[in-house]
Image (tube, grey):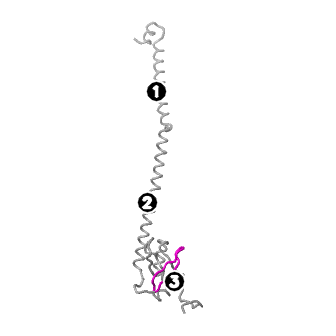
Amino acid sequence: MSLRDQFLKAGLVTADAVKKAETEKRKQQHQSTKQSAKGKQAGPSEEQRQRQAEQEAKRQRDRELNARKEAERKRQADLARAKQIIEANRQNDPQAEDRYNFQEGRFVRSVRVTDAQRRLIAMGKLGVARMDARGFDFVLIPREAALKVQEICPERLSLLFEECDSLEDDDWGWN
């Protein structure tokens, strides 16, 4: 027998007071469970916030890594495209005996040319391109191809003069 029943038998409390106390107790329990559930939903815990921050940082790192990989893929594709254009438009003459010297950065490079090719280079009709990034294979290519290479991969174009229609004979000219 509970304490409530004993008080009821002894006549210390009435049946209405017991019912009122029980309903009051149920209301308090309901309110406390409701508030505890609300407290849990109100804001994420410190652990959850930390986990979310770590996930966001990981997503950011992944995005940056993907951007770098994509840039590298694009660069490789551009290099391959430039190499294709250079190879397809190569105009080097295997019987050329003259050396045409030009400056590339702080170095003087050379390519074998004929007299006609030398004039076309000076007029801006031919350009000199590097076949590969580290090699010394310099290729003569027409102006249109040189402009495409310059657009795609500027480090591959070594020399391209401004276009002119004819050579002017200067004191130091071709005489």
Residue furthest top in the image: 10
Highlighted magenta segment, given as a residue range:
98-113
Q: Residues within 10 Å of mark 2 (few under 14, many from 20)?
A: few
Q: Nearer the viewer, mark 3 or mark 1?
A: 3
Residue furthest right in the image: 171
Q: Considering depth in this image, is 37 or 102 the residue closer to the camera?
A: 102
- Residue 124 is marked as 3
- Residue 17 is marked as none
The amino acid type found where label 1 is placed reads His
Per the image, label 2 sits on a secondary structure element best described as helix
- Residue position marked by numbered label 2 in the rendering: 69
Q: Considering depth in this image, is 171 or 14 the residue closer to the camera?
A: 171
**Label 2 vs 1, first from the N-terminus:** 1
- Residue position marked by numbered label 1 in the rendering: 30
Q: Quadrant of the N terminus?
A: top left
**Does residue 117 lie above or below 53 as drawn?**
below
